[in-house]
Image: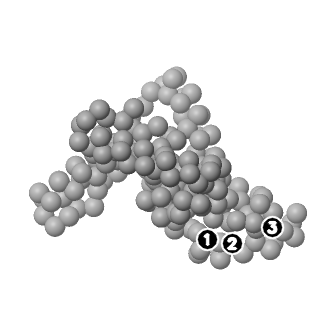
Amino acid sequence: MDDLRAKVDTDRLAEEHGSALYRFCRSLTFTREDGEDLFQDTFLKALERPQRLAADPRSFLFATALSLWRSRKRKYARRERIAPSEPLEDQAVPAEGPEEALLAQEEERLVREAVAALPEKYRLPLVLFYAMEMKVNDIARTLGLPPGTVKRRLFTARELVEKGLTGNDGPT
């Protein structure tokens, strides 16, 4: 086992997939700190299973991050039932002027809320496709779904986000 672990080139792995995985972790968690924790835990878990990592590193890393996030989400939900808390929002990067900055921040907030309001089965393919720029087949492999199902969920997610932004029968 240690021989396999030694053969995993962590520098190459981080260089090739690190930034995309980090963006994915951030998009799942919505906070920098939680995203960084998830990112680090994903790499640690990947190093524990080098045989699975060797086959398809990108899909394995994204699937591992997703699995860890789901586990944390369940833990968080249990804790919220005991002691509710309110998350802090990240600050948006200012635009040209104060008006543009305010409009950009408001638009970002509306899109984030519309995407966050989507059911998980629609939100995850949408985030993987747009934020992570993954291809449909890669998303299918990562989520363990047929490519046709991923395409349909992307289509439905786009419709739900559009309805949520225009105020017509928001996402359900």
Dot 1 amino acid type: Ala
> What quarter of the picture does the C terminus occupy?
top left
> What residue would you read off at disc 3?
5
Do the residues under discs 2 and 1 have CB atoms within 8 angstroms?
A: yes
Mark count? 3
Which structural element holds mark 2? helix
Q: Which residue is mark 1?
A: 14
Pick the residue in front: 20 or 87: 20
**Which quarter of the figure has residue 16?**
bottom right
Q: Name the residue rendered at 46%, 50% in the picture.
A: 154
- Identify the secondary structure beneath mark 3: helix
Relative to 170, is 106 above or below? below
Is residue 49 positioned above or below 143 on the image? below
Residue 90: x percent and y percent? 34, 51
Q: Is residue 124 left or right of residue 101?
A: right
Give 18 or 113, whichever is nearer the viewer.
113
Q: Residue at x 42, y 39 (%)?
A: 118
Q: Residues under labels 3 and 1: Cα distance?
A: 15 Å
| Label 2 sits on residue | 10
The three-letter amino acid code for the residue at tag 3 is Arg
Q: Position of residue 105 (x, y in %)?
A: 24, 53
Q: Nearer the viewer, residue 113 or 6?
A: 113
